[in-house]
Image (tube, rainbow, N blue to C red):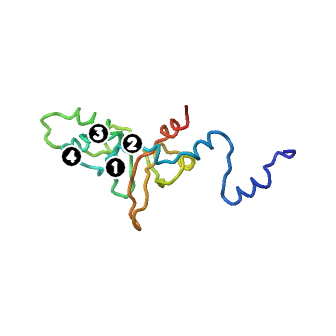
Amino acid sequence: VLFGKDSLFLTMLRASGIHYAANPVSQALRRIGVAGVMDRSFARVAATLSAGRARRVLAGGPHYLLIDLPEGRQMLMPAVDLARHLKALPADDGEPAIDLTAIPAVRLELAPIELQASLQEAWAVFDAQGLEALVVHRMTAPGIHHVYGILTRDAVERAYRP
């Protein structure tokens, strides 16, 4: 305290890769898992789909569309943006192909996080990568990841606020 340094115990924890934070927000985030906060209402779609397929996807009422891009990345889009685009399509246009990366919409870059992670770990990913959303997954077999939900920065903030 006299020299403004952390104790030996905290220094050893930090050297071991364990970051001890005693503030109330960190404690609350450590106690809550991402599985309890994630949004399970999403539909996984390709980057390009027909208008008919888009209507069938939206009929399920998802909050988000998890877009699988050709290069193996994923992107997140609110389903309401696709619904707005479909509503604006001319009625006599038939079944046009819709490129979800080109329509006017909010798109969020994603990073993966494990299903067993805490909200503190999720918050660290948000801060480190500057993202607004994470895709919650778990490896079910070697090389196969099952997606369980979407975690947004807003959902994490709502989880610890009274």
Residue marked by disc 2 = 107
Tell me whether the residue at label 4 lies in contact with that at label 3, contact meaning CB atoms closer than 8 angstroms: no
Eye-nearest disc, 2 or 3: 3
Q: Left or right: 24 with respect to 59?
A: right
Q: Choose the circle earlier in sequence order: 1 or 2.
A: 1
Query: Tag 3 or tag 2, which sits nearer the N-term?
Result: 3
Determine which residue is flagged by label 1: 67
Residue type marked 4 = Arg
Looking at the rendered structure, the kind of residue marked 2 is Arg
Rendered image: mark on residue 61: 3
Give the residue number, with chain letter if any, for mark 4.
53
Q: CA separation, marks 4 and 3?
A: 14 Å
Q: Position of residue 134 (x, y in %)?
A: 46, 48
> In the picture provided, is 44 more to the left or to the right than 155?
left
Residues at badges 1 and 4 in contact (C-beta under 8 Å)? no
Q: Secondary structure at mark 1?
A: strand
